[in-house]
Amino acid sequence: MQRYDVIVIGGGGAGLMCALTAGQRSRRVALLEHNGRVGLKIAISGGGRCNFTNLFAAPENYISGNPRFCASALARYTPQDFIALVEKHRIPFHEKKLGQLFCDFSSRQIIEMLLAECAIAEVEVQCGCQVESVERPERFSLGTNRGTLECDSLVIATGGLSFARLGASDFGYRVAEQFGLKLTATRPGLVPLTFDESERETFAPLTGVSLPVVARANRASFAEAMLITHRGLSGPAILQISSYWREGENATLDLLPQHPGADWLLGQRGSKMTALDLLEREWPARFAAAWCARYAPQKSLQQTRTADLEQLARLVHHWPIRPAVTEGYSKAEVTVGGVETSELSSKTMEARRVPGLYFIGEVVDVTGWLGGYNFQWAWASGHAAGEVA
């Protein structure tokens, strides 16, 4: 039987950060990863260049049952702290847009950096280690395919349900339930939305067309690009709003944010142009043709009633879409929901009713926006637990 001070289950961003931080405190640490190597989600992130943090990460960039829960961890391990680690390892990086920081070359550099820090801290990294049971007679006892392991502190960093092809599972939620912790219902987040049948028939032929929009749902709004796919809508604006959208509800798109309000369109009412003539100057021509054929008056603006032009302006700026569903966990970048924050200490991530048991990263009911925010939560929550476990 092998005994440790701390065992971290899950070799993603949060788990690696927690393990190296605990190891730096001279704890005897084991990091268990059921895949053949650590950091699989890090490796594919940012198109292989890892959007490893966001300069502007703050509590308002996160969805949670308790919006202030993440504030303590984020304040004590900031984007600048992680940037300092990246610079220490001489990894070149750049800001792409909106505070999003990416490696210049490869996300593999971030994984190698974290593994190097684990090695310095003498963390024992065990890949291909399957945890089959978790018990707590006195210390935590883990039944694994490599025998029984024991520890004083157990950290669950197993992520959510997104990216099942990378080995995602409900393991962390099952452990939480085993020890009596409450869960917030989970759903896919940062995920493409699918059209209903009638809209798919109209817009699916436009696959690949993109335009800037403001997407809105449940009082959240994001000004970014929208991308039409063969199944529905994607692109940054749609991925962002998907985390707020609930099945059966509408979302709205402002298709002309560069000309807010109705004045621009009403100012053209004396024109011999049609709505299509006007809008294809602002939108990709194929999108303008399909959208106007379905929603816009076909006669000239000069011949169109003012009331109809006002209705058209409303539709352009508040196009209601009712997605059928999302594309599910297989295409989701994150899982919204998880272990209820009321069950955990915001300072240490320790379960209030189970001393020595910690939950960090995506398994917790804290979900960031697109653009490096979820990695910053991984680093911050991992560091918070690693400082005390």
Image (tube, rainbow, N blue to C red):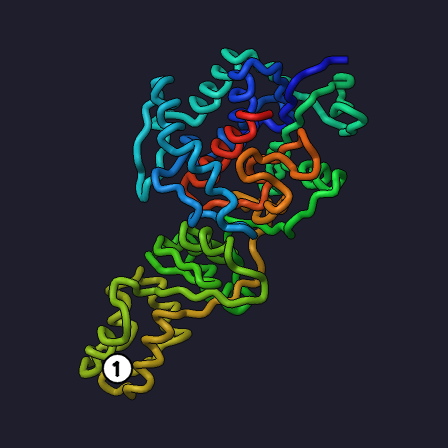
Q: Quadrant of the N terminus?
A: top right
Left/right of residue 174 with respect to residue 56 in the rendered view: right
Left/right of residue 116 with respect to residue 105 in the rendered view: right
Residue 334, percent across and down?
54, 44
Where residue 258 sits, quadrant-wise, is: bottom left
Where residue 18 sits, quadrant-wise, is: top right
Where residue 256 sits, quadrant-wise, is: bottom left
Vertical arrangement, residue 119 with respect to residue 256, above or below: above
Please report the residue visible at 56 percent of the width from the left and 13 percent of the height from the top: 26
Residue 104 shows in this picture: yes
Q: Quadrant of the C terminus?
A: top right
Vertical arrangement, residue 15 with respect to residue 319, above or below: above
Residue under label 1: 300
Amino acid on which the number 1 mark rests in the picture:
Ser
Q: Camera-side residue: 211 or 173?
A: 173
Vertical arrangement, residue 90 with respect to residue 183, above or below: above
Q: Camera-side residue: 201 or 93?
A: 93
Vertical arrangement, residue 376 with respect to residue 257, above or below: above
Q: Camera-side residue: 132 or 350?
A: 350
Q: Camera-side residue: 345 or 13?
A: 345
Residue 320, percent across and down?
45, 70
SS state under label 1: loop
